[in-house]
Image: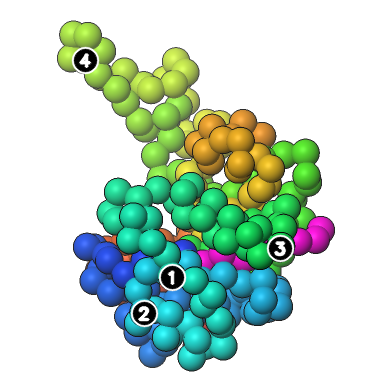
Amino acid sequence: MSNILYLIPARGGSKGIPGKNIKPLAGRPLIAYSIDVARQLADTADICISTDDPKIADVARAEGIDVPFMRPAALAADTSGTYEVLLHALDFYQSRGKEYDTLVLLQPTSPLRTADDVRQALALYTPDIDMVVSVKEAATNPYYNAYEEDGNGFLHISKGNGNYTRRQDAPHVWEYNGAVYVINVASLRKMRLGEFRRRRCYVMDSARSVDLDTPLDWMIAETIINNQR
């Protein structure tokens, strides 16, 4: 596989955990964990930090990664979509004669993802699909313990007939964990990620799937990292 861009998106604003992308996690800026993974997989020229925040850019440079552009404010609001951020980065490199056919999205909020996780996701990728995405087993299973209300206000199982008495007998269901996305650039230029139909999953365990959205998530991740040390 060739021409892979490793993209780490890191905007300055964050309501759940203020300044989280450069907030120290177990003694290191959060974004450094994703940079470490990317550097095990690619030359620094193929690692892109997309940020609107000079402080984040300074931290990235201190970690040895150049920041060739600053993300426009229009792509750094709470309502800004990942899709536009990905295209903006690809268009930047394309305008300078650098074409990528594969994009690996590494969100800083998944600090427990490893380089081996990315390698295994890349091994599942082929150019005839849209994306390989990392997942974990869903906490709630629509065949077993997820319910909906009917028109009369009564609960019924979301999928199936409700006859599963053991969770392990129900079909497996997965949820994105936000750690690794291996994206076909040709597909991305045609449609948004949610419109992809040819998706394969790379399964990760719950511990490495911690996604930092709340202070509690942060405490859990920090505890895991400190215990690993």
Q: Say which residue label 3 marks.
A: 98
Element type where label 1 sits in the image: loop
Is 217 colored magenta in this rendering? no
Magenta segment's dominant SS is: strand
Q: Say which residue label 1 marks.
A: 70
- Kindly tell me whether residue 88 is visible in this rendering: yes
Mark 3 or 2, closer to the camera: 3
| Range covered by the magenta-colored residues | 1-8
- Amino acid type of the residue that numbered disc 2 sits on in the rendered structure: Pro
Q: Extreme left residue here?
A: 153
Residue 171 on image: x %, y %: 56, 31
Residue 37 occupies quadrant: bottom right
Residue 134 on image: x %, y %: 57, 52
Q: CA separation, marks 1 and 4?
A: 52 Å
Element type where label 2 sits in the image: helix
Element type where label 3 sits in the image: loop
Q: CA separation, marks 2 and 4?
A: 53 Å
Residue 139 on image: x %, y %: 41, 45
Q: Say which residue label 4 marks.
A: 154
Asked whether disc 4 touches disc 3, contact meaning CB atoms under 8 Å apart, the reply is: no
Dot placed on the residue nearer the N-terminal end, 4 or 3: 3
Is 6 colored magenta in this rendering? yes
Asked whether disc 2 touches disc 1, contact meaning CB atoms under 8 Å apart, the reply is: yes
Q: Which mark is residue 54?
A: 2
Asked whether disc 2 touches disc 4, contact meaning CB atoms under 8 Å apart, the reply is: no
- Amino acid type of the residue that numbered disc 3 sits on in the rendered structure: Lys
Q: How crowded is mark 2: few (under 14 residues within 10 Å), some or many (20 or more)?
A: few
Dot placed on the residue nearer the N-terminal end, 2 or 1: 2
Q: Extreme top residue here?
A: 152
Q: CA separation, marks 3 and 2?
A: 25 Å
